[in-house]
Amino acid sequence: MAEAHQAVAFQFTVTPEGIDLQLSHQALTEIYLSGVRSWKKRIIRLKNSVITGVYPASPSSWLFVVIAILATMYTRSDPSMGLIAKIQEHLPVRHASFFPLTQCQAVVSAVLFSTMLWLLLIFTMRLCLKQLLSYHRWMFEQHAKMSTTTKVWALVRIFSGRKPLLYSYQGSLPNLPVPAVKDTVKRYLESVRPLMDDTEYERMTKLASEFESSLGNRLQWYLKLKALWAANYVSDWWEEYVYLRGRSPIMVNSNYYGMDFLYVTPTPIQAARAGNSIHAFFLYRRKLNREEIKPSRIPGTVIPLCAAQCERIFNTTRTPGEETDTVQHWQDSDYIVVYHRGRYFRLKVYQAGRLLSPREIEFQIQRILDDSSSPSKGEAKLGALTAGDRIPWAKARAKYFSSGVNKRSLDCIEKAAFFVTLDDDEQGMMGDDPAASLDRYAKSLLHGKCYDRWFDKSFSVVYYKNGKNGINAEHSFADAPVIAHLWEYALATDSFQLGYNTEGHCKGEVDSSLPQPQKLNWEIPPECEEQISQSLAVAQALADDVDFHVFSFRDFGKGKVKKCRASPDAFIQMVLQLAYYRVSGRTFCLTYEASMTRLFREGRTETVRSCSNESSAFVRALEGGETADVCRRLFRAASEKHQQLYRLAMTGAGIDRHLFCLYVVSKYLGVESSFLKEVLSEPWRLSTSQTPVQQVELFDLVNHPEYMSCGGGFGPVADDGYGVSYYIVGENIINFHISCKHSCPDTDAHKFGDQIRKALNDLIQLLSPNPKEPSKPEESRPEAKKDK
């Protein structure tokens, strides 16, 4: 109970002589310093709110306007056109012995007028900025053929002169527009044409036409009403219905992961790696709280992206409910929760109001590693509740964790800044079979042992015995680029700024008087243990079914693709279409590529339907043995079509989010739509996503490409499909993460990976100068020979 005694500021006992009060000066000091830190954060938030509120102006510009108005007044001119005099007439009359009354009133009136003028100027500038940020036609124009309107639009740079804070642009970002039903239906029918025969396509066209001419307009009216009222007509429904209302396990199905450096390990010491990395995470949180992180922008431009998702990175958890989960966020947390060998520890990272140094965090982590205590009854596999189905977890939480010591310990986990696992396994590219070890590494990060992660936390960091690390993130509160930004910063700060000494330990000194990490206590009844076992069985079956393959393609990268005058993303998407066509037995499928809508306020994602008429025509031509010139021409058309679809998705003219919201409205109104029901039930057998490098300045990709994360991945979206994440590193490396399910006889992650490698080489050979005529792939494929 020593830890509990340190947690209170005083103790008292009642004696015959009265009350004997015993103050804990250490605890009182901690309370005082915690209060000081809290007030500092409030003052910083207030200051940042003012700076953000007046952006693109600055608070000091108020003084400039006041001085300018007063200066013109003393030249006997009236810039207010009589308004200052009107204000002066309505000021209360007060006599002052040391200052002329009329002159004092004139100054006050001028200051009031200047303030109103300043606010009007700010409003006008923000309105102009919003209009400029609402213009997206520049994305569809070639640089050499820029229209006059786009050249004028370049004035947006004027508003980017002053250094913005993280949320400076939030009030100026436009709202997500609602596309016309007619346009969405037209694009949908175009997207499914290569996937349907003539009879099926005619039937779907009829359904779409009926929807467009009847129910669609009614649903659209409600959607436009919501768009006028809400900042974003999609995001809240997307978070609730796609993520929080899902009742299946979030492990594998929703959560995703990020990997460490592939070819280097900064230190082989587990505690040291954790010390530097945890310190780096809190440095990022400090910058986030102070809004010192630069707003994300479209690469190569000054166009800002919405930063709303950054607000809930830390101190956030997903709590289960029987019907729907909720996301809870706390303003601050000065500790993390660490899991090691079946035990949970509360580790404070602030001491006397200061952030612990990396060496001190390493010292505390080593204490946990050296702790020989046993887990409480039922504690070791408690995390399996977060890995199984959501309804049993919600019921168990309400029944067994709503009071007493279990509630206190669960609150401690949920209110922690983030979650940490100290894993006894060794992971990474190693051993006699590095490819297989990389696959095991991916599966470990995606699901672990199904009980040694807390999948409900916003993110959990895993530190392995050999010094490797990785991250597992919950998906409902933010999308992968937000966590990737944090992960890039942590990796770069860990290796390049903090560093290690010659023995591999964190640099600096340690205060050995730091209090011991506090082990959490639990009282798990047998009924709860039974539920833990059931959840673990569900989670383990799901984890065992996941087939994963990760590989780093180093034959060429985006540098060579660009020399062939092709978009790297479009190139890879065509590769995936070709590879899927080959591995699936000459068929196409509905393909999902994640795009972002963060050009708009509170924007999240939109779908790019990568399988198009143009892409399927190209694949058929290449597989059919057409000439290189024909294949190149069709590739260019498919690539341009893909880029056009991507631009439409980014600018709010996508297909799937609009149809999703129309479906939600129909459910609220209690009306059925055969068209919407069928559209939303179509499986995404190929789900893809690119993880872009956002902070290139933190890494030296030319001289040290090995110091870059291997990227990350996610589980398959469909039981009979693939999940593919790709990470373009520098000019010469592309990393792929492929997932599917063993239970499906038609999918194999390794075979698909082999086809991706082959397709990459086939396409670059086709696009390179003086390519050889592509040979008919049917002749070289065993399955084609069988068909013959």
Image (cartoon, rainbow, N blue to C red):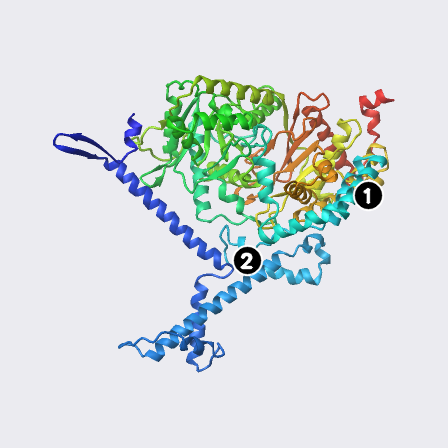
Q: Which amino acid does label 1 sit on?
A: Arg
The residue lying furthest to the bottom in this view is: 76
Does any portion of residue 644 appear in the rendered image? no
Quarter of image, res 447: top right
Q: Distance between the residues labelled 1 and 2?
A: 40 Å
Q: Position of residue 391 (x, y in %)?
A: 54, 27
The disc at residue 726 is none
Mark 1 or mark 2: whose residue is earlier in sequence: 2
The residue shown at (55%, 58%) is: 160
The residue lying furthest to the left in this view is: 17
The residue lying furthest to the front in this view is: 670
Q: Which amino acid does label 2 sit on?
A: Ser
Mark 2 is surrounded, within 10 Å at the Cα level, by few (under 14), some (14 to 19) or many (20 or more) other residues, namely some
> Secondary structure under badge 1?
helix
Does 750 sit left or right of 305 as displayed? Answer: right
The residue lying furthest to the right in this view is: 788
1 vs 2, front mark = 2
Residue identified by numbered label 2: 160
Q: Is residue 214 above or below residue 4?
A: below
Q: Position of residue 717 (x, y in %)?
A: 65, 31
What quarter of the picture does the C terminus occupy?
Answer: top right
> Secondary structure under badge 2?
helix
Q: Position of residue 510 (x, y in %)?
A: 33, 33
Q: Is residue 559 above or below residue 510?
A: below
Mark 1 is surrounded, within 10 Å at the Cα level, by few (under 14), some (14 to 19) or many (20 or more) other residues, namely few
The reply to whether discs 1 and 2 touch (Cβ–Cβ < 8 Å) is no
Does any portion of residue 104 appear in the rendered image? yes
Does 234 sit left or right of 452 as displayed? Answer: right
Residue identified by numbered label 1: 633
The residue shown at (33%, 28%) is: 516
